[in-house]
Amino acid sequence: SSPSRSRVMDTLVNGKHSPPPRRTSSLAYDNGSLEKYSKVDLWRQRQNLPPISTAVTTTTALSSSSSSIQKNENEPIFTFGVLTDIQYAPIPDGHSYAGNPRYYRHAKKAAEHAAIHFQEEQVQCVVNLGDIVDGKCAAVEKWGGVVSDSKRAEIAEGGSPVGHDAIDDVLKSLSIYTGRILHTYGNHELYNLSRWDLSNKLSIPFTLEPTNDLVGYYDHLLHKQQNQPSSPMKLRFLVLDSYDICLLDRCPDTSPKRQLAHELMLKNNPNYPKEHNSPQGLEGLSKRFVGFNGGGDKPQLE
């Protein structure tokens, strides 16, 4: 996934910064055995922390100097949920390219548990940071999955590939949460779908720029405080497209953004183009110059 989307985020709780736990579908397993989900966050349980019911965790509290907020400083003004890297695929358990254990089918169930929690907590919106499915959906049989004869015939006649169905499956799991989900996308979506398809599936309002490239950036405003109705504070989400400049799903012949990505790769990664996804020999921030990453162009940043 793109480092720009996986940077460390701080959750501001009662005016104090607290780094959130990294949560993936693999948290449902411990030493190969399936743990049962409960209303107590698994991460908090492993850290011997109190249950969610007695601590603010997945909600984000924004502090204010108004007297009404000071009286209820333990109550968050705004609440929202965060999802990232669900990476569901209808294939057996396996490992990531880095060797980490992966539970591809269970990821859909993990998304459902997250949606249940967000619904119970009545968060005001949810942000999905991308990679809702895994790139291996594009070749499920290669990774031990099964494609039925009817599905194979459907694809041959121009029907939707497995990756489309996989996204639908995850969205169904997430539909338990009835609020607004702010979707963005990552490299794994682009292995399976075009940006046109992502616009329809995830309701991302792509902009067709003068370069004839689609770029998916937008904003969302929370203007109603959940627990502090007297506060004038509003919260605006800015959803940026971190695959604006990239090699993926950009026409190599006509896309200036694809050409710019090509030039950046030539300049910064000696493995390119032969091993375009390899960070071998790169150090520090230079490791971002790989083929599965991307960046933002000037129009959306302006």
Image: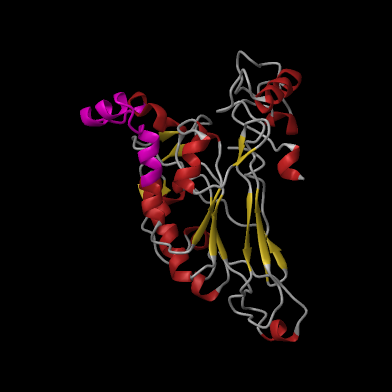
Question: Which image quarter holds the C terminus?
Answer: top right
Which residue of the protein is positioned furthest toward the top in this rendering? 274
**Relative vertical location of residue 206 with respect to residue 60 in this rendering, above or below:** above
Percent position (x, y) of residue 292?
59, 29
**Where residue 34 appears, x then y in whole percent?**
35, 50
Residue 136: name its quadrant: top left
Q: Position of residue 7 (x, y in %)?
A: 67, 46
Q: Residue furthest left?
A: 149
Magenta stretch contains residue 73: no
Q: Which residue is drawn at 76% across and 19% down?
A: 267
| Above or below, 18 relative to 138 | below
Residue at x-position 27% and y-position 27% = 152
Using the image as rendered, state which of residue 29 and residue 110 is in the foreground: 110
Q: Position of residue 233 (x, y in %)?
A: 71, 73
Residues drawn in magenta: 143-168
Residue 47 seen from this side: no
Quarter holding the N terminus is top right
The reply to whether residue 17 is visible in this rendering is yes
Q: Is residue 32 left or right of residue 268?
A: left
**In the depicted view, which residue is nearer to us: 15 or 184?**
184
Name the quadrant containing residue 94.
top left
Considering depth in this image, is 31 or 294 the residue closer to the camera? 294
For the image, the number of numbered tags is 0
Which residue is drawn at the image coordinates 34% and 35% (left, top)?
91
Membership of 153 in magenta stretch: yes
Vertically, is 291 above or below 166?
above
Q: Main secondary structure of the magenta part?
A: helix
Q: How is the image coloured?
A: secondary structure
Which residue appears at 69% of the width and 79% of the height?
A: 231
